[in-house]
Amino acid sequence: MRKPIVVGNWKLNGSSAANEPLVLGVLDGMRELAGIDVGVCPPLVYLSQVAKLVEATDLGLGAQNCAEHDSGAFTGEVAAAMLHDVGARYVIVGHSERRALFGETDAVVSTKVGAALGAGLTPILCVGETLDEREAGETEAVVRRQLAAVIAGNGIEAFEQLVIAYEPVWAIGTGRTATPEQAQAVHAFIRGQLADHDTAVAQSVRIQYGGSMKPDNAAELLAQPDIDGGLIGGASLKAEDFLGICRAAAQTVG
Ligand code: PEP
């Protein structure tokens, strides 16, 4: 049985005034939840603030990105070890916005996964196709290529220590969610690809769905056999919406 994991990606949102009530609201609601992992990924400058708020709680802290490099002349970058140093447990790697807007290639994403693992973080590895790719029938080929780069760079063993987020790009921030059947088909495909390398790893790796997941569509997505949680953008900015998704995930474990 894989433990569901729900993580909020705040993206470029938040302020020192707004973060505290949001985190305290999530912590309050989490007292009634059991059997799932929950995390939040604020912008980098707020990691230390949120680290203090979540200290000694079950709410995990994550970052939205990390550098490929450990240290050196890379102005503006933040190393995975620095994220770990300020209390992060997770780091999102290869989000489609970083791939599309900041030119992150499959090779860069693979290197970042290695950097995150080396620093003791759990990477949340994002994969997913654009609308054009889906309509061209290329969904599986795209996801296969994205995963193959990480397997080639880090070995299949890396998947024992990371979380995958399947995020169809056309569903992110658009209000257009993949149907449970569409999402399940790709999640099963991902597990199948990993099983070609190691069946135990394929069975144990957690695969989140991401893309306009909300309290009112979470239950049917999370009921799918290969969907093990959610990576949540817009709905993670309101404690009650985020908690609604967390509650749906907790219900899948009884
Ligand atoms: C995301 O950014 O990872 C995401 C899934 O966003 P949203 O929930 O807003 O679609």
Image: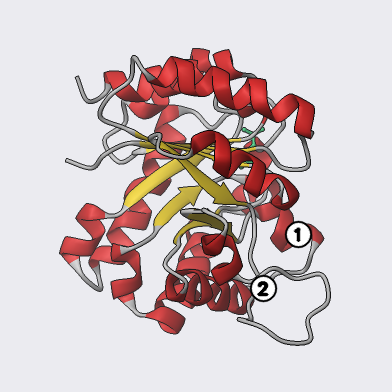
Residue 245: % across, % down: 46, 21
Quick one: label 1 or label 2, which is nearer the N terminus?
1
**In this rendering, is residue 182 above or below 197?**
above
Which image quarter has ligand 1? top right
Q: Is residue 103 above or below residue 169?
A: below
User: What residue sits 71% from the left and 42% below the top?
Assistant: 11
* Residue found at x 25% / y 70%: 196
Q: Amino acid at mark 2?
A: Thr
In front: 134, or 251? Answer: 251
Question: Would you place residue 196 above or below residue 227 in this image?
Answer: below
What secondary structure is found at the residue carrying circle 1?
Answer: helix
Quadrant position of the N terminus in the picture? top left
> Left or right: 144 with respect to 222?
right
Which residue matches tag 1?
A: 100
10 or 119, which is in the foreground? 119
The numbered mark at residue 71 is none
56 and 30: which is toward the camera: 56
How far apart are the alpha carbons under marks 1 and 2? 9 Å
The image quarter containing residue 12 is top right
Residue that label 2 marks: 105
Task: Judge from the rendering whether residue 81 lies leftward or rightward of residue 42; answer left or right.
Answer: left
Q: Amino acid at mark 1?
A: Ala
Query: Which class describes the residues within 10 Å of circle 1: few (<14), some (14-19), or many (20+)?
Result: few
**Disc 2 packing (10 Å; few <14; some 14–19; many ≥20):** some
Q: Is residue 42 above or below residue 238?
A: below
Percent x, y of residue 110: 53, 75
- Left or right: residue 203 compared with residue 60: left
The image shows residue 222 at horizontal and vertical percentages of: 36, 28
Q: In the image, what residue occupies the spot 66% across and 54% down?
A: 96
Quarter containing the C terminus:
top left
Which residue, as the protein is rendered here, is positioned at the far bottom?
Answer: 72
Q: Residue 236, position in %: x, y? A: 60, 28
